[in-house]
Amino acid sequence: MMDTVDVAANLAAVRARIDEAAAEAGRDPAAVTLIAVGKAQPVERIEAALEAGQRIFGENYVQEAQGRWPALRARHPDVELHLIGALQTNKAKDAVALFDVIQTVDRPRLAAALEKEITKQDKALRCFVQVNTGKEPQKAGIMPEETASFVGLCRESHGLDVRGLMAIPPADEDIALHAAFLARLAGQSGLSQVSIGMSDDYADAVRFGATHVRVGSAIFGARPPRSP
Ligand SMILES: *Cc1c(COP(=O)(O)O)cnc(C)c1O
């Protein structure tokens, strides 16, 4: 049966909205990176995105990504993979081996574990520091007021190549405030990259300073429920 989700058309529509939002904000649309989030999606849809020319992908789970990306990458060596889900220190080795960018660096122990693996594997890995901009107790991320010192620790004590900040703001709050706040925090740490915005709010995130948007269901359709 043909897949009912037209991934190529969805990708084009999302990209067009990003370009429009960037232009409205007086920013260069080319400076906004679209990360296609493949978590829990059938591999056929990822393949459709690759066919359509998409090369930058985000994954939430190390294991799921390990299951499909080595084979996909053999055919598309120019793919860039971002880890956007929580990373346990005992998975640092696998994550460093597979990903090009880890967006969820949020605690000193993880920074130390990444340093160790980056050195061991002699790998060029870029990082984002995750910030809990909504200060939600259950959510990962460094507190906003600790961002500058944690970025400094990552860079100076652990030699991490920190490029930007990432946030998953509370779903019921104004994305504009969180995007602008994250962009300001990034600037205060001398960082230019700002990863915020998902399917429901990426255009507004771009208007208020996102340089990286992470879009899943608007490209790939609704996710099937996770199997236990
Ligand atoms: C799932 C996920 C996304 C994409 O979510 P959609 O609403 O499907 O666009 C983006 N960022 C993170 C951290 C996610 O876990």
Image (tube, rainbow, N blue to C red):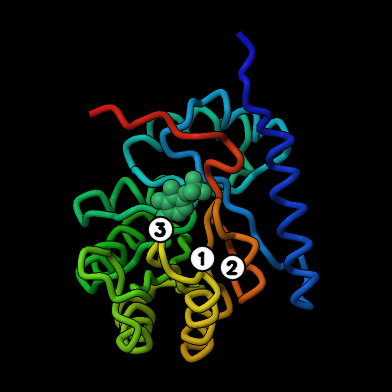
Give whichever of 123, 146 is nearer the camera: 146
Q: Calculate the distance from the C-alpha at mark 2 to the C-alpha at mark 1.
A: 6 Å
Comparing marks 2 and 3, which lies closer to the viewer?
Answer: 2
Label 2, label 3: how far apart the Cα atoms are: 35 Å
In the picture provided, is 89 more to the left or to the right than 106? Answer: left
Mark 3 vs 1, N-terminal side = 3
How far apart are the two marked residues, 3 and 1, measured between alpha carbons?
29 Å
Instruction: Give the vertical position of 56 relative to 143 (above or below).
Output: above
**Disc 3 residue crowd, few under 14, some 14–19, many 20+, Cα 10 Å:** few
Q: Residues within 10 Å of mark 1 (few under 14, many from 20)?
A: many
Tag 1 residue: 196
Identified at 45% across, 61% down, the residue is 125
**Label 2's element?**
helix
Q: Of tags 3 and 1, which is closer to the observer? A: 1
Whether the residues at callouts 2 and 1 have beta carbons within 8 Å, the answer is: yes
Tag 3's secondary structure?
loop
Query: Residue 31's spot in the image, x, y percent?
Result: 71, 68
Give percent across and percent down for residue 181: 48, 82
Q: Is residue 27 above or below residue 60?
A: below
User: Please, is residue 98 above or below residue 135 in the view?
Assistant: above
- Closest to the observer, 131 or 101: 131
Q: Mark 2 or mark 1, which has the lower sequence index?
A: 1
Contact, mark 2 vs mark 3 (Cβ under 8 Å): no
Return the mark for residue 122: 3
Quarter of the picture holding the C terminus: top left
Point out which mark residue 205 bears.
2
- Measuring 51% from the left and 73% from the top, which residue is drawn there? 163
Contact, CB < 8 Å: mark 3 with mark 1? no
The foreground one among 81 and 171 is: 171
- Crowding around mark 2 (Cα neighbors within 10 Å: few <14, some 14 to 19, many 20+) is many
Question: What amino acid does circle 2 point to?
Answer: Ala
Q: Amino acid at mark 3?
A: Asp
